[in-house]
Amino acid sequence: MESYTILTTDANKLAAKVHNRMPVIIDSEDYDDWLKGEQIPLVPYPPTRMTARPISTTINNVRNQGPDCVAPRDD
């Protein structure tokens, strides 16, 4: 059986505009330690290293798949 888990943390300032939680984003400097099973800080990713843009409401339906789900809005 294959499975996965999404770890969440408190939202950073950018993500907080959408939700109070966000996925943990592992910094590339921590990849090796994470893969070795060592503990790394599971903290909000720096908002200065992220961008946000409005997308279509196409994403709101699980039956919708493909690039249209993350296409920029036309407004």
Image (cartoon, rainbow, N blue to C red):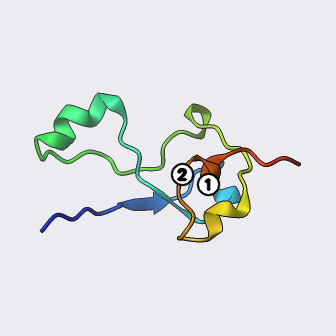
Secondary structure beneath label 1: helix
Q: Residue furthest top?
A: 29
Where's the N terminus, which quadrant? bottom left
Task: Please state the horizontal and vertical placement of residue 26, each as a whole percent of the image.
Answer: 35, 42
Task: Determine whether label 2 and label 1 are within 8 Å by CB.
Answer: yes
Residue pointed to by mark 1 = 69
Secondary structure beneath label 2: loop
Q: Name the amino acid, label 1.
A: Cys
Label drawn at residue 66: 2
Task: Please state the horizontal and vertical placement of residue 49, each as a whole percent of the image.
Answer: 56, 32
Q: Residues within 10 Å of mark 2 (few under 14, many from 20)?
A: few
Q: Residue furthest right?
A: 75
Q: Residue at x 32, y 47 (%)?
A: 41
Task: Please state the horizontal and vertical placement of residue 31, each as a whole percent of the image.
Answer: 25, 35
Q: Residues within 10 Å of mark 1 (few under 14, many from 20)?
A: some
| Location of residue 36 with respect to 28 vertically, above or below | below
Q: Residue at x 72, y 56 (%)?
A: 56
Q: Name the amino acid, label 2.
A: Gly
Q: Is residue 9 left or right of residue 57?
A: left
Q: Quadrant of residue 19?
A: bottom right
Q: Residue at x 74, y 50 (%)?
A: 54
Q: Quadrant of residue 58?
A: bottom right
Task: Please state the horizontal and vertical placement of residue 75, each as a whole percent of the image.
Answer: 89, 48
Distance between the Cα atoms at labels 2 and 1?
6 Å
